[in-house]
Image (cartoon, grey):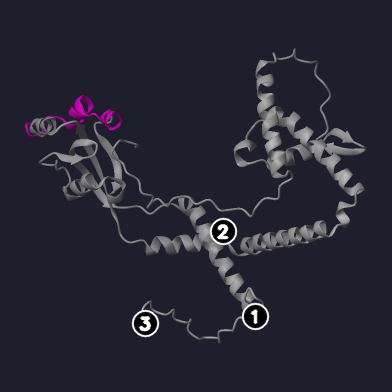
Amino acid sequence: MVNAVRFRVGLLPARRVQHREPPRMTFFSRGARVALLLALSAAAPAFAQTPPAPAPAPAAKPPGDPVVAVVNGQSIRLSDVQAAQANLPQQYRGLPLERIYPALLEQIIDAKLQVTEARKSKVQDSDAYKKRLAALEERLLQEQYLTQEIDKRVTPQALKERYEKKVRDLPPEEEVKARHILVADEAAAKAVIADLQKGGDFDKIAKDKSTDKASGAQGGDLGWFKKADMVKEFAEAAFMLKKGEVTPAPVKSQFGFHVIRLDDRRAAQPPSMEDMEDELRAELSREVYGQMMEGLRKSAKIEKFNMDGSKIPETPPGAPPATPPTPGKN
């Protein structure tokens, strides 16, 4: 239940960590992307102002990947447009293809024309082109190799085993189920406590008087929570109570004054594997990368040089790293 006093700090359940994909190769240059976005911005009013055309008569179903343009004899297919959409920045990929199709198609046509002229002028024979192509090939090989090796080792079984170990290693933690009534001032909180001591119904008072309307509608119920889930003052007071007890004095926090009742307590449940999967995958991927690079370095002959070309002295295997001098000492 979301309410005013919760203060999540991302301990458990584990915050989902996105597994980073290798950098995506982009069909368009940065300038082309900007041009595309400008084209989309310019086209948007036209889309909004143009009234819908009458529905045409049913046409024959197009092939799965139809030709959508021909440039000097070179075909552009629908799949080319879809690939261009997939390479847009994340925030634009979700736009309906129908909306951005005209601008994307124009960009692909422009790219075809530029490539044709580049080939005519023998750009591909220049040293600069060959150097960039070689660097690009190395980068693609690196990315593909890393992806391949990580996918081999970060298996469902490896994730399951890591999850089970994480759960085993979690320190024991308690959680409680509590209700509260939140009011603006201490006098009102003391009046609530007095009503409860006379036999007043906690649920009814919470519904009538609590300024936390979300929990108040549920009789003040906050559900299960751990100490770290709540602001410090509230958590300390709640966890000191015994089952069925109400705080004998108002509890002040940044939200106002609370009257808290403890309903139950139990050992906290560990996060599910689904909740932790992204975090586990990222953790294992980092480990695999480290192990892989350590092995590659051990089997390679590597020489390093200073910026002036002089050789960097090798550190003997097993030798401790040099200790930096302490300031002020010789």
Characterize the local packing of mark 1: few (<14), some (14-19) or many (20 or more) Cα atoms within 10 angstroms.
few
The local crowd at label 3, few if under 14, some if 14 to 19, many if 20 or more residues have their Cα within 10 Å, is few
Report the residue at 54% width, 66% height from top: 287
Q: Are marks 2 and 3 in contact (CB under 8 Å)?
A: no
Where does residue 159 sit, x and y in percent of width and height? Answer: 52, 60
Q: Main secondary structure of the magenta part?
A: helix
Q: Quadrant of residue 80?
A: top right
Image quadrant for the N terminus? top left
* Residue underneath mark 1: 310
Magenta-drawn segment: 196-217
Residue under numbered circle 2 = 156
Q: Which residue is mark 3?
A: 329
Q: Residue at x 74, y 34 (%)?
A: 104
- Point out the tag, 1 or 3, that comes first from the N-terminus: 1
Image position, residue 92 (x, y; %): 63, 36
Given the image, on which type of amino acid does mark 3 rest? Lys
